[in-house]
Image: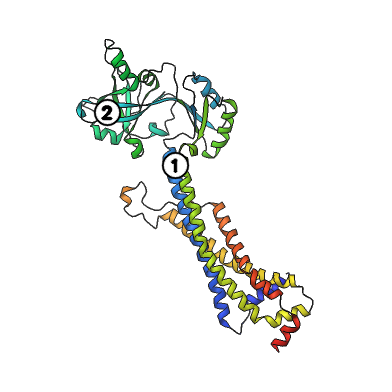
Amino acid sequence: MDYRLAIAQRYLSGRRSMPLISRITAISAIGVALGVAALIVVLSVLNGFFDFVRDMLVSHDPHVRIVQVDATRAMDEEALVALSTRHASVVSAVPYIEGKALVMHDASADVNKIVRVRGVDPARVPTNSGVASAISFGNYALARQNQRPGIVIGKRLGERLLLTPASPGQPASRIALVSAPAIERMFTRVLSGSPLQQFEVRGLFELQTVFDESYVEIHIDEARRLFDRPDGLSGVDVRLASLEDADRVKAFLEQHLDPEQFTVQTWYDLQRPLYDVMQLEKYGALIVLMLIVLVAAFNIVGSLTMIVIEKRRDVGALRAMGVTKRDIKRIFLIEGLLIGVAGSGAGVLLGVAVSLAQKQFGIVKLADAGSFLIDAYPVAVRATDVTLIGILALGLCVLAAWYPAARAAAIHPAEAVAMSG
């Protein structure tokens, strides 16, 4: 063992003439441990909320989206799908047309509701994601049946407009969608027949309130007629085997697509303001809670300074034996490091244990959990966060030991021995 480490350990663990020093040192280590544990728990909870919100949004949003920038230029649907599926991480590529329309329904003529309409080919839509996987009543059938096109709507919108799919003894509700091109046709082509496109409600889905109240899906062919875009396409939604591949797939697509006609967005780009705010909250919490560790570090300054005063004669003897100022300084820096290792190690173990217990058993419940999709605080422990917190805590402890170490290194051997005598 290095003699500097051995001396540092002896100074920390040996008997003292002033027991108060040992208590202050122990309090310093406990303060570091509690600060580190609090940091790990809070950041793990914030990570849990981030993952929950991300998964909730990605259940509807694609992992990667190709969006047409120049609507005047035609998009080759099959070519875009073929390009997307060339990447090994791509599970599905679904072309879509999107726009806004007014919902009209005989049973609720006094209700005017603008909805976002998305037209897709159900044959291309994965059954385990998005609206197709969230049907709670009816089925995901958009194709024409008995000359009537199908539509699926959010459950909340269905409850509001009293719309239901077909059931034994009751026919399916019917609604009309009126788009801007349809209104234009209404005034410019008076004799061309009704501009209203009628749809039969085939299914109700449950995602999130923001989608359930203002989102509907129809067949892509019906969307082309509704928005008067016979050869049009808004973009392509791409789903991947793993979210972690989103940036690589984005880079691959951008290499092969004309940037003047297409833009490629990842799941993060689609909701960037929300995700950025959540990340800002996380790092804000990190900075604020590091103050707890900083306070504990000030205790380390006091305890090590008192150790320097107590061991002044020993330091003088070491200097007289030929130990350099640099080595004296290192002895007390090692003491700060040992306190940091003890405190940080205990804090990491405590913080990870509490976080895993919350994740496994949901010990701390959310207030008024009935209005949330989860009943307990979500937790996601990140190895990078734990490592960062541990390194920062150790760094603060070593930094706190710098002043006492410098003071010890400045002790003159002759003066130390004379004063002790």
Identity, as a three-letter code, of the amino acid under mark 1: Asp
19 relative to 97 in the view: left or right: right
The single residue placed furthest to the bottom in the displayed view is 421
Q: Residues within 10 Å of mark 1 (few under 14, many from 20)?
A: few
Say whether residue 144 is visible. no
Identity, as a three-letter code, of the amino acid under mark 2: Pro
Image label count? 2
Q: Residue at x 69, y 87 (%)?
A: 420
Label 1 sits on a secondary structure element that is helix
Q: Position of residue 276 (x, y in %)?
A: 48, 45
Q: Residue at x 61, y 68 (%)?
A: 400
Q: Residues within 10 Å of mark 2 (few under 14, many from 20)?
A: many
Which residue lies under the disc numbered 1? 55
278 relative to 28 in the view: left or right: left
Q: Position of residue 19 (x, y in %)?
A: 57, 82
Which residue lies under the disc numbered 2? 165
Q: Is 239 or 234 nearer to us in this picture? A: 234
Q: Is 331 or 88 nearer to us in this picture? A: 331
The single residue placed furthest to the right in the displayed view is 322
> Which label lies toward us, 2 or 1?
1
Counting residues from the N terminus, which is met first, the one under dot 2 or under dot 1?
1
Q: Is 8 or 99 nearer to us in this picture? A: 99
Decide: is 406 above or below 107.
below
